[in-house]
Amino acid sequence: METHPSVQTDDGYKYELVKRNITSAIDNGVLLSGDRIPSLRAMSRKSQVSVSTVMKAYLDLEMEGRVESRPQSGFYVRNKIRIFPAPQISNPELKPTPVDSFHFHFDILNAMAETNIVPLGAATPSPEFLPVAELTRLIRQASLSHENPYGYEEIPGNRKLRAQIAYHMLEAGVSAHLDDIIITNGGSEALYIALSTLAGPGDTVAVESPCYFGYLHILETLGISALEIPTDPNIGVDIGALSKALETYKIKACILQPNFNNPFGCLTPDKKKQQLSELFSSHNIPLIEDDIVGDLPFSGVRPHAITSFPNNGNIIYISSFSKMLAPGFRIGWIHSGYHRDALLKSKMAVSLNSNRPAQLALANYLSTGRYSKHLKNYTVKCRKQVDLVSSAVEKFFPTNTRLTRPEGGFLLWAVMPKDINTDILYAKALAEGIGIAPGSIFTSQNRYRNCIRLSCAHPYSDKIEFSLKRLGELAEE
Amino acid sequence: METHPSVQTDDGYKYELVKRNITSAIDNGVLLSGDRIPSLRAMSRKSQVSVSTVMKAYLDLEMEGRVESRPQSGFYVRNKIRIFPAPQISNPELKPTPVDSFHFHFDILNAMAETNIVPLGAATPSPEFLPVAELTRLIRQASLSHENPYGYEEIPGNRKLRAQIAYHMLEAGVSAHLDDIIITNGGSEALYIALSTLAGPGDTVAVESPCYFGYLHILETLGISALEIPTDPNIGVDIGALSKALETYKIKACILQPNFNNPFGCLTPDKKKQQLSELFSSHNIPLIEDDIVGDLPFSGVRPHAITSFPNNGNIIYISSFSKMLAPGFRIGWIHSGYHRDALLKSKMAVSLNSNRPAQLALANYLSTGRYSKHLKNYTVKCRKQVDLVSSAVEKFFPTNTRLTRPEGGFLLWAVMPKDINTDILYAKALAEGIGIAPGSIFTSQNRYRNCIRLSCAHPYSDKIEFSLKRLGELAEE
């Protein structure tokens, strides 16, 4: 016999209700892996049931593997048990390689920018996740209140925006002076300026392997060779291999992305960041630290930058608002370390200064204090999309696939069985209107041809799920 | 005995009235040098006086040197007889010179960007001359109607804007395909991309002498030597010297600004443009044609670009909206000639793409058709400011000064007596809150130290007049 829930009021029923509420919140993606579930006291109050009954329900859920207790902290949604193992540490050839594949990849990069394909390729956030309406309002407000809203901005960038950025960088543990900040046309120009200032034709720059293809294009344009360093999809660059490379070759600079690197999404632990800082300082080799998605930590704790650890000033830190607020504003920045004058001169030669209305709007947006709240909501959304895409990949991709477990950002890296060529998969998928980034563009060597990077920065939908299913089918072909 | 004007109605009086109206219109800057005054018939109708009486008044004005008749065309305000002669052709040393003065000029360039100084230094138009309110409206409109207004733009730039630019380039006689147009972060990035694509460290690029200091900064940043070509302040670069240079040295590219070059403001005649086009085609040396103020002809006739004459496709044409509509938008463009692929790859490495809301607003603005009218009004204003500043310079500057007679744009170049050092004048003027551009920054050689460039793109005022007077006094010191 069925009983109407409202009729059954005894603790036995409520105990089931508590369990069911938590379970369905997890199943529906309301509570995500790593989320804290309501405290015993809060749940007791909310469900009008004794603390001990809630405790019994929570312990049951823990037994079932849905949640886990953490001492002195409470109960947390347990990380989903992934079927696919994480990829292994990469194993590139440890020697400088000239970069010359731009012409192969040019069409791929152009195709990724297409708007009418399923957006699993480009690392571009959906406008649904960004405060578009608020920025529109702020641009207008800034234009109406500024005496010369479309005049040239100061060469290092809008002073108020630089002050807001310096304040924001405290989150990454960096005490920045606004004079050390240079506004750039997105992270791309920041990277270009840093690299062209530090190295030239015939030089060598060390990068993670695999790494963001944009690094490689800049290196190719500048005639610089890449030295790819083995990188662990769980904890980032291999320090041993990096040390060896620094001792073996004349390396003009190194680019690292310690926080949720592209494409792995992994977090380099603090201890290791400190070691890296010491390593570069002791060799006095410039580090370019790319912290472009450091603001999107799934744990909720904003990780520190390498720049925040003691160093000799030979670090150029770069970041951008492109992944956080407005890709098309093309506003990024450099924290210059002791290279300030050289970088500023380069900025002046490359583009003089950056778009003023976008800078005014961002300065106003950051000063409202709403950025932290946006980042928090946005991170939860990214984490949820990554979870959902991961589950679909495990469901649809070939059995022996390996898949990263990113700790922030919105990217996934899948390593498929060796016999799958993702350049071909890319072309087949594109023909069906599905965009992915094939592994070959993330290296200067002949590698990662069985890998793809998936971007999860768009709301999960039937279309995306269907596309992931099709990718699995196409890969199996 | 005084008579009240309205009482005196005979032709004798009206004849005086016609004369007085024209004279005061000229004196008040309503009619400018080169303007056509009303036709005989129109003035006759307007003043209710016979055509022959108007003719008598006009002939009187011609006798007085205020107007001049042109056959089959009518009467025109006569060009003011300038007291100061035009500068002579420049005489730089015709050999490649490494550029290494950026560090000297850095403070000057920064100071020019200051907003609290009298703006005679920077070549930046006053917001009063630009359609600021309309652009604000169009940015908002574009942001509200676009599905992803702050997303990444296509790498070559917004398609609609490129189409509008291609259409606009017909004015300069160039039939451009929108696929050959690449949107850049202002003219600066366009120049940087063109130069870095065509030449590298140790190479030589030919430029006019004097030339826009921005060229020199880019050359210095790229390690390229400048070969300065003698340039005539009336008709532009010296073709004989240029031919000789092309035959004597290995020149990787040449930058020319045939339409109202910076700092002379002179117009290269069509015949000469054709010769230049032939010269570069026959040597197959790339020409970078900078046409950034070609839209501001004092004659009212938009001059042709060198690109419009028959050539072998080895011309990169660049321009920008920075001087015409919105400096702070940082939107310029390249018409790529046959270098398209290389330039597009460079653009991608340098900054990926350009600010989308600015591109959307400009595309909408150009499609309204109001750009032509704006340019017409704006050109009249520039011409008027140039006239007024020229008169003040003749009044206040040392007797043996020479002064350019620009045919478009808003810049003046004054060559003062040899013993005046304008680096010192610059510093003294800046200390009094007056900004000028000293001649030394327009060359890679030790030249032009008795010259200054004056920008006339702000409404003439007592403050500007007083500043010009002070400049004269400081120069005499």
Image (spheres, coloured by chain):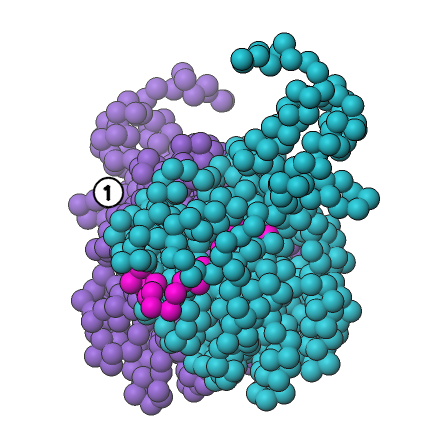
Chain colours: A purple, B cyan
At a point 74% along the width and 53% down the height, the residue shown is: B170
The reply to whether the magenta stretch includes residue B416 is yes
Asked if A356 appears above or below A403 in the picture, the reply is above
Asked if A1 appears above or below A316 in the picture, the reply is above
Q: Residue B230 in the image: state x and y as whole percent.
A: 55, 75
Left/right of residue B380 with respect to residue B368 in the rendered view: left
Residue B213 visible (yes or no): yes
At a point 30% along the width and 74% down the height, the residue shown is: A286
Q: Which residue is mark 1?
A: A74
- How crowded pointer 1 is (Cα within 10 Å; few <14, some 14-19, many 20+) is rated as few
Residues shaded magenta = B408-425
Q: Nearer the viewer, residue A356 or B236?
A: B236
- Name the quadrant of the C terminus of chain A: bottom right
Q: Residue B205 in the image: state x and y as whole percent.
A: 54, 78
At a point 28% along the width and 22% down the height, the residue shown is: A48
Left/right of residue A282 with respect to residue B403 in the rendered view: left
Q: Residue B21 in the image: state x and y as whole percent.
A: 62, 27
Residue A459 visible (yes or no): no
Asked if B104 appears above or below B73 in the picture, the reply is below
In the rendered image, the residue lying farthest to the front is: B1
**Circle 1 — which element?**
strand
Amino acid found under the numbered disc labelled 1 = Gly
Q: Nearer the viewer, residue B109 or A415?
A: B109
Q: Residue A345 in the image: state x and y as whole percent.
A: 37, 66
At a point 33% along the width and 90% down the height, the residue shown is: A248
Left/right of residue B413 with respect to residue A462 in the rendered view: left
